[in-house]
Image (cartoon, rainbow, N blue to C red):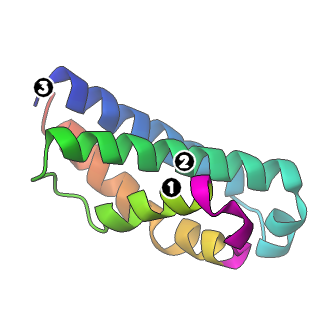
Amino acid sequence: MDKESLKLLWDILEHAREIETMTKGVTYEQYASDRKLVLAVERCFEVVGFAMSKLLTLRTDIAITDKEKIIGLRNKLAHSYDEIEQVNIWSTIKKNLPLLIEEVEKLLGENK
């Protein structure tokens, strides 16, 4: 895999792990009431989505589930931020983030 694609995968992994770390042991109620945490998580998702978008311009065949949804979340955060429902962000963290991390780790492991 080319250097730029690997860099983007590392950016995705780093920010996805950061979300995981920031929300570990946190309830939805704690998350939703912590403005700094919400903003930090949203920013990380923006980076993940932007890096994914750039990655897909280089590698349309990348094996990541829901890559278009990841980009869509980033676009919604950046352009329709006033329509964001934190319960949906929380659901994404709990249901989709672990798979994203697993898939990116696998891709990076294959390119050592």
Give the residue displayed 12% in from the left and 25% down from the top: 2
Mark earlier in primary sequence (1, 3): 3
Amino acid, disc 3: Asp
Q: Is residue 78 above or below residue 7?
A: below
Horizontally, is 2 left or right of 95 in the view?
left
Mark earlier in primary sequence (1, 2): 2
The span picked out in magenta is 78-87
Q: Is residue 46 visible?
A: yes
Horizontally, is 49 left or right of 88 in the view?
left
- Return the x and y of residue 57 as percentages of the image width and height: 20, 42
Q: Nearer the viewer, mark 2 or mark 3?
A: 2
Q: Residues within 10 Å of mark 2 (few under 14, many from 20)?
A: many
- Say which mark, if any, is on residue 46: 2
Figure quadrant of the C terminus: top left
Q: Mainly helix, strand or loop, the magenta region? A: helix
Alpha-carbon span between mark 2 and mark 3: 23 Å
Amino acid, disc 2: Glu
Q: Is residue 20 visible?
A: no
Amino acid, disc 1: Arg
Alpha-carbon span between mark 1 and mark 3: 24 Å
Q: Residues within 10 Å of mark 1 (few under 14, many from 20)?
A: many
Alpha-carbon span between mark 1 and mark 2: 5 Å
Horizontally, is 14 left or right of 68 in the view?
right
Q: Nearer the viewer, mark 1 or mark 3?
A: 1
Q: Which residue is mark 1?
A: 74
Q: Residues within 10 Å of mark 3 (few under 14, many from 20)?
A: few
Q: Are marks 1 and 3 in contact (CB under 8 Å)?
A: no
Q: Are marks 1 and 2 in contact (CB under 8 Å)?
A: yes
Q: Is residue 105 magenta?
A: no
- Return the x and y of residue 80 as percentages of the image width and height: 63, 64
Q: Which residue is mark 3?
A: 2
